Amino acid sequence: MAIADLIEMDKNPLDMPTKQARRQSFLQDYFKDQPIQVIPLPGDASFRKYYRILGADKSYILMEDTPDRPPVPPFVMVEPFRDIAAHLRRLGLNAPQVYADNIDHGLLLLDDFGENTYTRLLNAGTDAKPLYELAIDVLIHLHNHKDRCDVKIPDYTVKTYIDEASLFIDWYLPAITGRSLNDQARADWNSAWTEILSHLPEDQNTLVLRDYHVDNLMLVEDQKGLDKCGLLDFQDALIGPFAYDVMSLLEDARRSMDETLFDYLLYTKYLPSIKGLDQQAFLKSFYILAAQRHAKVLGIFVRLYKRDEKARYLDFLPHVHKLFLNAMQQKEMEPLVAWFEKYKIDFEQTPDIDRIKGVKQWA
């Protein structure tokens, strides 16, 4: 039977026949006449689509991020994923191997790491400590590797940080205050962040995967050592501070971590393991980056609801807001505290989900 007869049609009406034809041609070129089955997998917060390929010598994953999808920033295609995956594998980490690619059509054929995401395992009651220890060991290995930055990707710049943090004032603040900001308020917001970000260390740079959390980590069966940790969703990677991915893992936007485990992973396991690390500079950057990321994520989660109709992300807002408040207690965040005071915005205000949904109106 031909591949075309076995492909299960994507039920998304925006997935035009042209895209299906591209997938068929791509798979036909690789698998020839093997009787494969292509099964759509649940999506995530991005425009990417994934399919599991069964019936060949082993299971594969087809990643699709087409050039004709909506051009919503950050507009990242599959080429960065391919190149960064190769770099991670050179460093001795378990990113998916890429078996075939069509960059023009946004298609990659990858290793299938299975079903055991960290999220699924934790939700099923698996002991958290060994999973997080393995994830921290991956970062220790990466951050100690002499070639960690030897990949052609952009640096994390002040502009990038501020553009991300500004999702907070573009989406989150209007949703919880009913107010929009004028140009002067935005300029002052940028100035506050510029001052804060000047405290980031300049000598603690690495490959930053940027979304290093339990949704993007997998426990890979039949592997040993660091290879047991499968890495996903790193196509947005940049060169930036050591602290970013450590913070992203330990201050997950979607789940809480036991304080004892947090302290063990950060203070007992990670910090003593990094060669020549200025720990005070690291911890200062940890909470600056925490405030920046949590501000960004608060904005993203509201945007996912309002723009993309993904209401489930609103459930995470109280947790992320709590993490944001904790980071705002640090001395380096005083310029942002002053900004909130100047514009009479109570950043400690708990997000009101009903108001964001429009169930409760502003007076």
Image (spheres, rainbow, N blue to C red):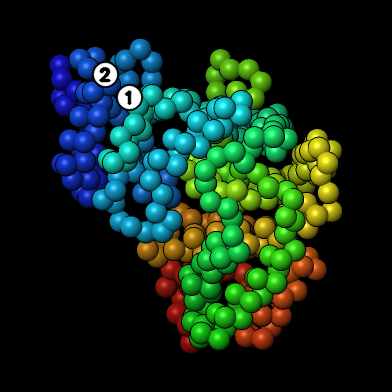
Q: Residue 195 at what x, y percent from top left? A: 70, 72
Q: Is residue 322 visible?
A: no
**What kind of element bears circle 1?**
strand
Q: Is residue 21 above or below residue 54?
A: below
Where is residue 335 shown, x and y percent of the image? 72, 76
Q: Residue at x 43, y 56 (%)?
A: 74
Provide residue 262's location: percent of width, then percent of height: 76, 44
> What number of labels is visible?
2
Q: Quadrant of residue 221?
A: top right
Numbered circle sitting on residue 31: 2
Q: Earlier in the sequence, mark 1 or mark 2?
A: 2
- Compared with 62, 250 (above or below) is below
Q: Amino acid at mark 2?
A: Phe
Q: In x, y percent, where is residue 146?
A: 69, 34
Asked if labels 2 and 1 touch by Cβ distance under 8 angstroms, the answer is: yes
- Give 202 or 326, whichever is nearer the viewer: 202
Mark 1: few/some/many CA within 10 Å (<14, 14-19, 20+): many
Crowding at dot 2, Cα within 10 Å, few <14 / some 14-19 / many 20+, comes out as some
Under mark 1, the amino acid is: Ile
Identified at 18% across, 45% down, the residue is: 16
Question: Tag on residue 53?
Answer: 1
Horizontally, residue 219 falls left or right of residue 102, namely right
**Is residue 31 among what the camera can see?**
yes
Under circle 2, the secondary element is helix
